Amino acid sequence: MLMVNDRRLSADAFWFTLFHEIGHILAGDFGVSTDEDSGAREDAADVYARNALIDPEAYRSFVDRQDFGASAIRTFANAINRDPGIVVGRLQKDGHVPYKDSACNAMKRKYKVMIV
């Protein structure tokens, strides 16, 4: 069983977390983990999630151009068939775009979970 929480409701965090957990499963790393966990298993799951969501070669090429404007992000996201918010989240995590950049944050979709 794979479980993720809905603590971070932005699409980039959701998809990264989902693929991170899938990385654990594919590596045969079963068990309960928490946000405080670290180490080789967590690092490997992070790498899997990053690479599954955004091809590393395409990302490196995009970053090398050093154009992190909204238009460039949308164009790159379309080229790799990803939501622009996922690209923004990666750029923020890697320190290329500030977390408080409202123009980029506007591209990050928010999920709303409803239980009926």
Image (cartoon, rainbow, N blue to C red):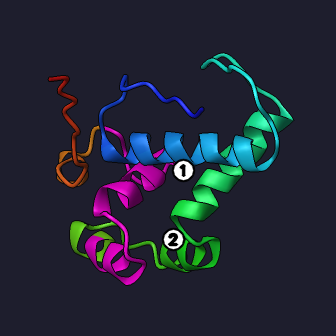
**As shown in the figure, which amino acid type bears the numbered disc 1?**
Asp
Q: Are marks 2 and 1 in contact (CB under 8 Å)?
A: yes
| 75 in magenta | yes
**As shown in the figure, which amino acid type bears the numbered disc 2?**
Val
Above-or-below relation of 15 to 76: above
Residue in front for this viewpoint, 83 or 76: 83
Residue in front for this viewpoint, 48 or 2: 2
Above-or-below relation of 104 to 51: above
Point out which mark residue 63 bears.
2
Residue 111, position as x, y percentages in the image = 23, 38
Q: Secondary structure at mark 2?
A: helix
Q: Secondary structure at mark 1?
A: loop
Quadrant of the image containing the N terminus: top right
| 50 in magenta | no
Distance CA(mark 2)–CA(mark 1):
10 Å
Residue positioned 30% across, 33% down in the render:
9
Point out which mark residue 94 bears.
1
Span colored in magenta: 74-99
Q: Quadrant of residue 20?
A: top right
Chief SS of the magenta region = helix
